[in-house]
Image (tube, helix red, strand yellow):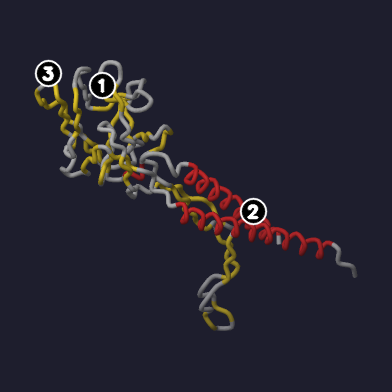
């Protein structure tokens, strides 16, 4: 019966992590470019009381007896399915339709990646994130520029001194395994080395997604789906707690047996 206590306890710990991940998904339902996560579980080691194929009385047993020892979280996988687009009318807001990430420069000189395209102009006229991180490659727009436009292929154009001029070119990066990215917070990801092949300097629409100027990508969290997952996780947690209570009662009965 002690095995049941530990097994049910592992179930409660696993479902607690599951609830934590679901709560994080729901908390970021309105976060631009947010990608939901899910917990992947694995069963634990088994105790073999009788192996399959064991011979008894000259006969081979077709099935054995194994008792498992519970569950453990194996990974929290981030799902990079696309989110819906919301029109903003701001020419500096960019959504990526398809694969790809924006590359930004961090204050320590390293680079990070994001799907959040809510860019602004800093005091020097460069495109930056909401936290002031510089977009790479650098995109500069003169302060006196008017009628700023960013095309689906990433080409910046604006009106300057009464004439239409072309500016810098926005590019994207892609990973063969984006699930290997590590979330840093602030809608940013870092390359962990598990992301596979990194391709940089991609023109939008060429081997990567295109840009949707004046739109932002919303999170890919489906509230109804997360609520259903939360109910299932809650019931699994309650069932594991019931198993602990049942095991405790059985131990109490065995402990109080009289001759």
Q: Which of marks 2 and 1 is nearer the N terminus?
A: 2
Mark 1 vs mark 3, foreground winner is 3
For the view shown, which residue lies furthest in the top direction?
A: 124
Indicate the position of residue 204 as horizontal and vertical percent values: 19, 39
Q: Earlier in the sequence, mark 2 or mark 3?
A: 2
Q: Disc 2 to disc 3, how far (Cα)?
A: 71 Å
Q: Residue at x 33, y 31 (%)?
A: 112
Judging depth in this view, the residue of 217 and 200 nearest the camera is: 217
Mark 3 sits on what residue?
Answer: 161
Mark 2 vs mark 3, foreground winner is 3
Looking at the rendered structure, the secondary structure element under dot 2 is helix
- Disc 3 crowd, CA 10 A, few/some/many (<14, 14-19, 20+): few
Looking at the rendered structure, the secondary structure element under dot 1 is loop
Mark 2 sits on what residue?
Answer: 9
Indicate the position of residue 220 as horizontal and vertical percent values: 38, 48
Q: Residue at x 41, y 37 (%)?
A: 183
Judging depth in this view, the residue of 116 and 195 nearest the camera is: 116
Q: Please determine whether, in this image, residue 93 is positioned above or below residue 176.
A: above
Indicate the position of residue 175 as horizontal and vertical percent values: 27, 42
Indicate the position of residue 169 as horizontal and vertical percent values: 16, 30
Please indicate whether residue 203 sits to the left or right of residue 49 in the image.
Answer: left
Q: Quadrant of the C terminus?
A: bottom right
Q: Disc 1 vs disc 3: Cβ atoms closer than 8 Å?
A: no
Q: Disc 2 vs disc 1: Cβ atoms closer than 8 Å?
A: no
Q: Disc 1 to disc 3, how far (Cα)?
A: 20 Å
Judging depth in this view, the residue of 180 and 122 nearest the camera is: 122
Q: In which quarter of the image is residue 205?
A: top left
Mark 1 sits on what residue?
Answer: 126
Mark 2 vs mark 1, foreground winner is 1
- Disc 2 crowd, CA 10 A, few/some/many (<14, 14-19, 20+): many
Q: Residue at x 48, y 51 (%)?
A: 39
């Amino acid at each position: 019966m002690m095995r049941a206590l530990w097994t049910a306890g592992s179930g409660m710990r696993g479902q607690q992590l599951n609830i934590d991940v679901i709560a994080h998904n729901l908390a970021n339902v309105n976060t631009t470019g947010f990608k939901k996560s899910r917990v992947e579980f694995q069963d634990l080691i088994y105790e073999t009381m009788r192996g399959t194929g064991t011979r008894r009385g000259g006969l081979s047993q077709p099935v054995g007896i194994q008792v498992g020892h519970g569950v453990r979280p194996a990974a929290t996988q981030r799902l990079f399915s696309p989110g819906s687009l919301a029109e903003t009318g701001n020419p500096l807001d960019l959504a990526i339709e398809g694969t790809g990430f924006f590359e930004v420069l961090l204050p320590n000189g390293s680079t990070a990646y994001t799907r959040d395209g809510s860019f602004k102009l800093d005091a020097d006229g460069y495109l930056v994130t909401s936290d002031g991180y510089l977009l790479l490659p650098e995109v500069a727009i003169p302060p006196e520029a008017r009628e700023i436009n960013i095309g689906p292929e990433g080409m910046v154009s604006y009106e300057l001194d009464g004439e239409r001029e072309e500016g810098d070119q926005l590019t994207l990066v892609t990973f063969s395994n984006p699930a290997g990215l590590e979330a840093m917070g602030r809608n940013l990801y870092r390359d962990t080395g598990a992301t596979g092949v990194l391709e940089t300097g991609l023109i939008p629409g060429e081997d990567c997604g295109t840009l949707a100027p004046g739109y932002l990508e919303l999170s890919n969290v489906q509230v109804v789906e997360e609520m259903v997952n939360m109910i299932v996780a809650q019931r699994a947690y309650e069932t594991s707690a019931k198993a602990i209570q049942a095991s405790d009662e059985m131990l109490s009965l065995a402990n109080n047996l009289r001759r």
